[in-house]
Amino acid sequence: MALIHSTSSLADIAEKVEAGERLTFEDGLRLYQSNDILAIGKLADTVNRRMNHEIVYFVQNHRITPTNICAFHCNFCSFRRNGNEPDAFVRTPEEIVAHVQKQHSERTREFHIVGGLVPNLDVEYYAEMIRQLKAQSPNVHIKAFTAVEIDYMAQLSQLSWRETLQILRDAGLDALPGGGAEIFHPDVRRKICPEKVDGAGWLEIHGIAHELGLRTNATMLYGHIEKLEHRVDHLLRLREQQDRTGGFVTYIPLAFHPENNNLGRVRHLDWTTGFEDLRNLAVGRLLLDNFKHVKAYWISMTPRLAQVALSFGVSDVDGTVIEEDIYHAAGAKTEQGLSRSELVHLIQAAGRQPIERDALYNHIEVYSN
Ligand code: V47
């Protein structure tokens, strides 16, 4: 039986999906332009079930923010400080380790570390932070530093991207998070984050990380000034990089949050809608045929919508996410952290099989469904 009705305007795309054929730029655009969200969801769910069956992953993880001071001025960011505000901070590796020791549980399996760009913090500060965290918590994977941070520390330390990544890997880095990707297309990138490494550089840094044996993630910041063409372009650039180096594990679309930042204020931008969030996840699942996982980031889209997203191509709901800063600064109303049992319930109640994982998707515990 056909996946969607033969009279649907998406019937030719459905045939390609059924046959496992790669979708084109034009297909991606048509999917984004279609309001037939159930058909798109069905296609994405089919692809996801082929790859991940009933399984939905989560991890017990903890956010670490070394600093909120940032030399860059991305206009979507609500988190950065110049350095002279009362709430600006830089934490030493010792302070970070002492803080984490108080907070994290026996079952924590991932530290997700991302922060601002500070002109006197070179690669040695970051390598020392990793060494100390690994010494204290050898069972916890370290997923740290976006490609933008890698580029900035390489410049400060007068090292190549490869040398910088090698130093961090030798210190114990396990994986790179997907942040800093935003929108690769230069027409958008130069308006929202002109100081960041460009799209080609972001992709090259991830490619080098893959060659060094590090797994990485990829994000896309959507729902601001980008057009649908820019989203498709972004996804296809990720797909091409994955064809070249193969080390991306998970794609995470990030919905723009408009509070407390210039982009939201000046352009009077609104929040994305649930419809858009689901369609965007599903289109990502369909275009990124060489990515194993698509993640619904409940912090930004709420746990309730993240649960519905499990029928729209999603195989990962991130994790407990203790101590998140970036989204809460930009107006996220979601709670600070979900418990393991809440995540298990959310997945089971959608008829799926929860598996608790580490940062590299090794199984920690398999739950009933
Ligand atoms: O790159 C910043 C985004 C990203 C806003 O790899 C904003 O598993 C919305 O990358 N509204 C950092 N988004 C977060 C990130 C991430 C999140 C979850 C999981 C993973 C992973 C990575 O946050 C930034 C930027 O795209 N961001 N400000 C805002 N106002």
Image: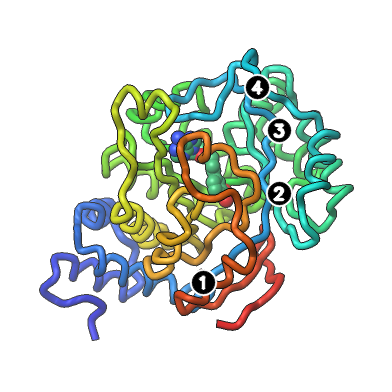
Q: Position of residue 67 (x, y in %)?
A: 68, 28
For this orientation, the residue located farthest to the top is 84
Q: Which of 55 and 107 is in front in this view?
A: 107
If you read the primary sequence from the N terminus, does the residue marked by circle 1 or circle 2 appear first?
Answer: 2
Give, as a three-letter code, the residue at label 4.
Answer: Ala
Q: Residue shown at 73%/49% (left/top)?
A: 142
Of labels 4 and 2, earlier in sequence is 4
Q: Which of marks 2 and 3 is nearer the N terminus?
A: 3
- Residue at mark 4 to residue at mark 2: CA–CA distance: 22 Å
Identity of the residue drawn at 79% across and 37% down: 96
**Furthest-right residue in view?**
135
Q: Is mark 1 on a helix, strand or loop?
A: helix
Q: Which amino acid does label 3 sit on?
A: Pro
Q: Quadrant of residue 288?
A: bottom left
| Residue 284 circle label | none
Residue beneath disc 4: 88
- Mark closer to the chain start, 4 or 3: 3
Q: Residue 111 carries which label?
A: 2
Which residue, given by chain and number where applicable, does mark 3 sit on? 66
Sequence-first tag of 1 and 4: 4
Residue 238 at x, y percent in the picture: 45, 48
Judging by the rendered image, the residue that carries numbered circle 1 is: 347
Amino acid type of disc 1? Ile
